[in-house]
Image: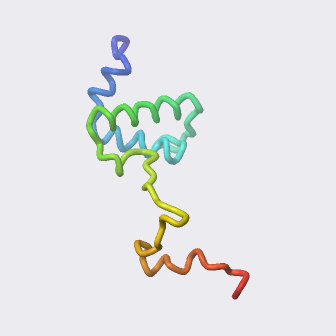
């Protein structure tokens, strides 16, 4: 594996390996329970991001994706589901 480059590893990464690395980054530990070092976390995250870019993973499925929301006067609140509508009420008035 001495001739394995980071780029080559990304090209050869399977979806299963991608999911495993993604989970390792999220949990900060390997599947066997060992904790990732800071360097391992950084490399795994870089590999995951590169895989997503190379394989055209939809934006909403990528690591770190945050749905764009509007706030302030531009937000009408009409898109808030009924089950979440009361979450922002002022609890001090109860």
Q: Quadrant of the C terminus?
A: bottom right
Q: Residue at x 52, y 31 (%)?
A: 42
Q: Quadrant of residue 51?
A: top left
* Front residue (pair 2, 44): 44
Q: Where does residue 56 sit, x and y in percent of width and height?
A: 27, 39
Residue 78, horizontal then vertical, whole percent: 42, 75
State the quadrant of the N terminus.
top left
Residue at the limit of the structure toward the right, as seen here: 92
In-image side of 85 versus 5 (left or right): right
Q: How many marks?
A: 0
Q: Determine whether, in the image, residue 41 is placed left or right of residue 16.
A: right
Q: Nearer the viewer, residue 11 or 27?
A: 11
Which of these two is toward me, 53 or 37? 53
Residue in the image at 34% along x and 46% along y: 59
Q: Residue furthest front?
A: 73
> Residue 63 appears in which quarter of the rendering?
top left
| Residue at the image point whose x is 55% and y is 40% from the top | 34
Name of the residue lying farthest toward the bottom:
94
What's the coloring here? Answer: rainbow
Q: Nearer the viewer, residue 64 or 25?
A: 64
Q: Residue 91, percent across and down?
A: 68, 80
Looking at the picture, how far across and down is residue 85, in whole percent?
50, 78
């Amino acid at each position: 594996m001495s001739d394995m480059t980071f780029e080559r590893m990304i090209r050869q990464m399977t979806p299963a390996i991608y999911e495993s690395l993604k989970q390792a980054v999220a949990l900060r530990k390997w599947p066997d329970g060992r904790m990732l070092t800071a360097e391992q976390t950084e490399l795994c995250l870089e590999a995951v991001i590169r895989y997503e870019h190379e394989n055209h993973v939809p934006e909403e499925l990528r690591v770190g994706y945050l749905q764009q929301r509007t706030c302030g006067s531009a937000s009408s609140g009409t898109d808030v589901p009924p089950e979440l509508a009361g979450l922002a009420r002022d609890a001090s008035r109860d």
